[in-house]
Every structure is written in C-alpha cells, then in structure tokens.
Amino acid sequence: MSCEGLNPMPQASAFRRRPDEVMRLARMGCSHPTRLSFLRQLLRRMRAEGWRFDRPVWQIDEKGVGRAVYRAIGPVRTYSLVAFAHDLPPEARSDRVIATAWDATFALFDGTPDAADLDRLAANVPLQEAGRVSPRELSLSRANRSVRLFDHVVERLAEGAQPDAAMLLETGYLMRTTAVYGSGKFGAADRVAIAQRPELSAPFQAEMLSVWLTRAFTVDLVEHLARARGGERAARLAPDLKRGLGVGNSTGLGMAPFLIRHPVLLNNWMLAREEALARVRAQTGVGAAELAGFVAALDDARENAELWTSDHDIQRLRLADLRDGLARITAQVAGDWDQSTPHPWDDLWRWGCKTLPLEGQEALLAAMLEPHGTLIDGLGDCMDADEGTAFAINGAMRVAELRAILRAHYDWALGVDYTAPDQCARFWYVSEDKLEPRLGERHEEPGAERELPLDTGRRAAALWQALQGQPDDRPVAHLLLAAPRHRPAVRRAQIIARHPFAEIRDNLIHAGMLPIDILRCKLAFFGATRFDPRSDRWVRISLFQDAPYPDEMGAGA
C-alpha cells in the first residue's frame, strides 16, 4: 500500500489478510469501529490543530423553538452548524424517510452565516427535501427526540436533580438523526468542491462535524428547557452523564448500496484497516504503553458489550458471541499469551482466528489497533478515493487477461446457478416516492424489470459465460461492441484487478443476504456503536458516545 507522505512497511506484507477472507458479508457484518473510523479522525485533527468552538447565536424560546449557530473555527476555515428547533406534535414524529416534519433540522454552513444567510436557511432547512440549499451548505440533516428520555432529562434537571443514569445508558442519546445529506444533495456543495481541503479530505468529515455539533446542541437544548421550567433551581447535566450521550441515527436500505457503487472507496477503507492490522501483527515486541492501551481498550469493549442491547434475534446471538469472545480474549491476555515470541501480536491474532467467533475476531482487531496510533494513524490519509480515474474501461485488454481476473477475484460467483430461486430471490431498485434504493422480492413483488446493476456476482458470471469460445488475444472492446450489457461487469473486473478489496464477495441478491451486514460495515467506518437492527433492512446506532464535547477540546483536556 502506498500513500503520499506515508512510509511503507514492507515487512507487514506477510501478515496481511486475503480479500477472499475479509470481504465476506458474515465478517463485514461483525465490523467494529477503530481509531481509523472517520469520527475519530475528525476529533484527532481538530485537537491537534487547536480548533476553537463557540455558539454566537442562541435564539431559542421557552418552548424550545428557534435557531442556534455553532462554530468550529480551524486554522484556515470556519464551519457553522445552523440549527432550527421546532415544536413538533407527537403524532407528526416519525423516523421514516417519508416524514415531512422533525424536532430539529440542521445545515452545515461553509463559514460564518450572516443575518441574510440565516433567514434564507430558515426558509429552506426545516423543509429538508422540499426546500433548497446552496453550495455554501455542506450538509443537510434532521433529528427527532428520543421522547421518553428527552422529557425525563428536562424534568429532572428542572427539579435540580440528575436524570436516571440507567435510563441514559439504556438509550444512549437524546436525539437521533434520520438523515444526514451531503455531496451535492438538494443544492449543497458537491464533494469535489471541498475534497482538496485537508480538514475535509478524509471521507464524510463534513457529515461527522455536523453530527458532532448536533450532539452539543441537544445537550444545550435540554438544559435550556430545564432552566425555562425550573428557573434558578435547575441543574446542568453532570459531566459523566453528559459524556455518555451520543447522537442516535436511524439508517435504512438507502445507505446499503453505497459500498457496492463505490468500489475504489470501499477498497481504500478496507485496505487501510487491513494494513493497520498487518503492521500491528508485524511488531516484534509488546511495549508497556501498548499493552496498557490494549488492556484498556478491551475493558472499554467489554463494558460497551454489556450495555449494548438489541431485540433483533440475529444481533442478540452476535452480542452473545461478542461477550464470550471478549471474555476469552481477556483471559488469554492475562494467562497464556507469551509476549516474548518474535511476533507476539501475531501470535495473539492467530489464536483468536482459531478459537473466537467472527464477532470476537473483529473486536480483537479493533482492540489491537487502539494503542498503536503512531504506527497506523497516517493510514487515515489513504482512505479517500478519486473514483473517476478507475471509471474508464480498457478496451484493449485481451480476453485471456480478463478471464484470469475473473478466475482470481470472482471464483466465489462463477459456479453459482443464478436461475435457482434462492440465488436470485432479491432485486435492488429505486423507489419512486423518495428516489432511494430499496430491495424487492423477485418471486413475490413486481418491479424486477427496473433492477439496479447491483447483482455483481451474477453479472460477473454472465461475463464469464460470454467469454467462453472467445480467442485469448481478442481485445475486450470487440465483446463490448457486440454485447454492451457486459460493460459494468468488465469495468468492475478491471477495477478489482488493481483494487483487491473493492468487491463484496457474496451474492447480493441471495434470499439469505442481510443488508444489515453491509450497513454495519459502513457504519463501523463512520465510528458507530450500539448497532441495533430493527429488521434485516434498517438499524439504529449511536455516534460520538463517550467522545469529548467542543468545550472539552482544549489542550490537556
């Protein structure tokens, strides 16, 4: 792996996992956040660069209605979260994407908004999709209160008391976002307009900044409402309770195809994480600081696993595996782990692969990365992608080379009978009402004629069949002139030849395929915790739980 400004570590190559092991949905669906996750990258940068934060506007009335502005002031640029709080009747509150009203709406503004900007945003941001924003906005989002907990916190603070700690731990957030839009949606700035800014070059940094500032707004709002109700006797939220709150998020199928549609970006995310693991495994000793950090990370993971709950059958089983795996890792570290061997971290990893379920293995990965920031943090600079460079098809490639690529990278797909009902049970399409990706049941629902080209395995197999009987030295362009339907499959094959982690190596239209596995992989790279599926197609998570707040980001905090 290479990346500008990053020193390669050839000695790590022997410790890298193979894509055919890593890129399976069963493992991807057990992903955990790591120190390379995007919200962690954002917080590290802001602290290292000495960013400052303030709240120049707070125009919220005693009912919790109005506007506020939170500024993040960096060494070169300023970004402002413009927040609008609304009085939403209970019957109008919905987490569904088709909702038209929310408890709060937000836009991340490029710079410091003036009065005219705020009025323009006030006329559009509360409408979300029905409004329009400008290239001065980098993201558009909305959130709803976790009503029972939100009201409980306001009530207790108004009385001068603290809320019930167990209730806070159970839910973990006061508000949950139902969408955070960026990258040009509804008139906001395109990704290309900000990608060269160092502070936004890593993936989803604008969206992560928006959510992090939203977290500060939710705490300020409950304390404001408590003061409005309780006056001078009202209390502020205790620092330890406040720190344990994140921002919830409800995420559905609309996010799942992202990893399929952005193969080079997926490759770079996975490759950075795998390179990080290989570097740790290649270490020839265990330093005292690294051991202490690793043990602390395990302790944190065990505490999180105990607090993590879910009503979903699959996730309950995975949580049991996780708790069991973490207990076994802790016992191994305290007992039989020999730290005097040539590669003790690799020994621990190999033990985990032999004895732990997938949940435990991926949790071990996250814990092993945690104390090695100096070794691996630079890999965060390699997780963006210029996908336009991989889009063009090389028509001069010979058939023999294309066959070799398919054999090497699509062997999992070539022998599947895609006419079997279970192998082609689903189809991806775009909904007419919200223009969002959805998943249909091919044998039960209409609409398969509008299928999206996300059936990557089936398309690779069809390409393989089309190549049968073709001369080895024939250029691929000849095939595509006769059968242009194979263009997407040829493009993906040529991409994966250069980017081996670019493809999910499972049948994405199989009856047993779980979209939540795709969602969890992506959300782990965001830095999400408390993954709680509500079905196999949508999930609730928490972001920034236990992270610092803006007023805690100073030197020495």
Image (cartoon, rainbow, N blue to C red):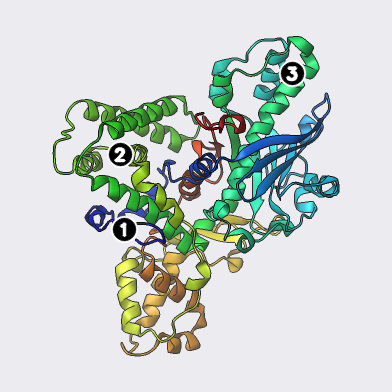
Left or right placement of residue 20 versus residue 552 in this view: left
Helix, strand or loop at label 3? It is: helix
Q: Who's the residue at 29% across and 49% down the image? A: 279
The span from disc 1 to disc 2 (Cα, nearest Å) is 31 Å
Q: Is residue 415 visible?
A: no
Towards the viewer: 52 or 350: 52
The span from disc 1 to disc 3 (Cα, nearest Å) is 54 Å
Q: Who's the residue at 72% across and 10% down the image? A: 159
Q: Quadrant of the N terminus?
A: bottom left
Left or right placement of residue 204 versus residue 116 in this view: left
The mark that comes first in sequence, 1 or 3, is 1
Q: Is residue 234 above or below residue 281?
A: above
The mark that comes first in sequence, 1 or 2, is 1
Q: Who's the residue at 36% across and 90% down the image? A: 474
Q: Which mark is residue 357?
A: 2
For label 1, the residue is 8
Question: Which residue sits furthest left?
Answer: 341
Q: Amino acid at mark 3?
A: Ala
The span from disc 2 to disc 3 (Cα, nearest Å) is 46 Å
For label 3, the residue is 226
Q: How far across and how far down the image is residue 400, in percent?
A: 31, 83
Q: How far across and how far down the image is residue 50, in percent?
A: 56, 40
Q: Amino acid at mark 2?
A: Pro
Q: Amino acid at mark 1?
A: Pro
Q: How far across and how far down the image is residue 332, in percent?
A: 22, 30
Q: Is residue 285 visible?
A: yes
The mark that comes first in sequence, 2 or 3, is 3
Please state which of the two labelled residues, at mark 2 or mark 3, is closer to the viewer: 3
| Dot 2 and dot 3 residues touching (CB under 8 Å) | no
